Amino acid sequence: MKEQKGSYKNMKTIILGPPGTGKTTTLLNLVDEFIQQGIRPRQIGYFSFTKKAANEAANRASEKFGLDKDNDLPFFRTLHSYAFNQLGMTKEKMMKVEDYREFGQKCGIPIKTAKFSSDDGTFNSDNEYLTIINTAAVKRMDLLEYYDSRKNILDIERNTLFLLSEELKKFKKEKGLKDFNDLIEDFLLKETLNKFEVLFIDEAQDLSLLQWDMVRKIWARAEKTYIAGDDDQAIFKWAGADVDHFIALKEEVDDIKILDQSYRIPGGPIHELSQNIINKVQNRFKKEYKPREEQGILKRYSDITQVDMSEGNWLVLSSANYFLDDAKDLCEIQGWYYQYKGINSVSLKLLLALNNWESWRKGEKLNHLEIKNIYQYLGSNVLVGFQKGKTLHSDAKYTLKECQEQHGLVVSDVWFKSFEGLDPMTETYIRNMRANGEMINKNPRIIMSTIHGAKGGEADKVLLMQDITNAALETFSYDPDELHRLFYTGATRAKRELHVLDPKNFDRAYII
């Protein structure tokens, strides 16, 4: 049965959460209040821009309230996931990289990568035509109108763009496939929807106009809606996010609440610097928040070799991945353990093998899985026929001597003399880490990331690089707010120290 128009209260509140003000905690406290009032968890919708944030909220809620995440909290999702669920879709019906490649071969255009992120639904491709087609869709713009509005179109033929768009529609229809944008378009046509007593829309500053259309359809059937976000941290415009729509909501909501105490940003120079950056933005919610009482430290460097990352937890941030190469080189020279693009500088399997080998040499016993992992790095130092550990029993533990006597092991020297097949650079790097006392049995102290990839993260110490790409520089010439927000987001990841690195090229940089 269709709900009658006007049958819901539609009370809407914006919650503005500046960096580190505990936005997720605030939202979950509201969830707690409503559950205490007798609202069933299944009548609560909690939708976030990223899968990571939605899962975090669901995990925290399930732990706090003793609920089963899957059964009791089925509507703690991303908007794409909710559309996928409500439409009864399967993964087989979704466009994948191989489908885009097949489409490219059919049309005679090279496509190596093309996929929607399972985390935030953003589209990434090496083919500019596909990127434009997708961005126009999320912006709810006519394709050719969007093309004409672009100020930095390079080597894109207007007619070719239109023809490829039409061919892509035909391809998906013939194959019975959908992309993430199609999901939302189909959802917008759906007549029967869940009714929510309370609806939460988190990270609202990152939603596209297409997603906003979906949100409006959902909140039309909600009693109360809380729209949470921070326009100052809106850094996904390149993916179609429309922060202006979020800001414009102030004219139609019932209340606006600002979380005004940051539990991350220290007082003094870091807070002052970040405020100086964000105050340059023209269109924003004017808001103030208090930093922590602890005074932060701000340092500047002309060269990365001047940066000492030998202690503490670090975030190394840049506007693009390739600006991080110098930081990677520095870490490898100095013997610092780091992570780049989610990959540790030394594989966890190798580090486990090294640590277990040293424990083994000291007389400890290891189980068969630990020994098998070591064996794969020993090569000829394990006799043929024993290298896969088939003679080891799964319910037993062994000393190094026992494996020498019964299971084909022929060495007992230090790891760098016993492990075969390690390239000299990897060996030197690991030996430097161990000599420095680097804790290499845990997650790396140093995380390298783009500013976009680190959104929501934090660290005691942040190294922020000022270099930007030529494309970003061009964007800055007609839309400076985008870069102001980007570097504000980077600067506000720091809990204690912010380290700012001079650019290699001052003519191609965002100067802080």
Image (cartoon, rainbow, N blue to C red):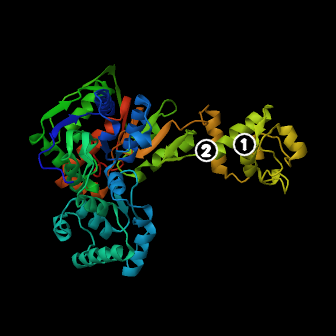
Q: Nearer the viewer, residue 255 or 413?
A: 255
Residue 367 at x, y = what percent? 75, 40
The kind of residue on which mark 1 rests is: Glu
Residue 205 at x, y = what percent? 24, 45
List the residue tagged with mark 2: 348
Mark nearer the N terminus (1 vs 2): 2
* Residue 257, visible in the rendered structure: yes
Give the CA separation, mark 1 to mark 2: 12 Å
Q: Residue at x 20, y 30 (%)?
A: 258
Q: Secondary structure at mark 2?
A: helix
Residue 204 against residue 163 in the figure, above or below? above
Number of the label disc, if any, that sits on residue 487:
none
The kind of residue on which mark 2 rests is: Leu
Q: Secondary structure at mark 1?
A: helix
Q: Residue at x 67, y 50 (%)?
A: 424
- Within 10 Å of disc 2 (Cα), the crowding (few <14, some 14-19, many 20+) is some
Q: Nearer the viewer, residue 273 or 126?
A: 126
Quadrant assignment, res 132: bottom left
Quadrant assignment, res 183: bottom left
Residue 228 against residue 113 in the figure, above or below? above
Residue 134 against residue 510 in the figure, above or below? below
Q: Quadrant of the C terminus?
A: top left
**Which residue is most to the left?**
251
List the residue tagged with mark 1: 370
**Which residue is most to the front?**
1
- Within 10 Å of disc 1 (Cα), the crowding (few <14, some 14-19, many 20+) is some
Q: Is residue 379 left or right of residue 442?
A: right
* Residue 21, visible in the rendered structure: no
Which of the two discs, 1 and 2, sits closer to the camera?
Answer: 1
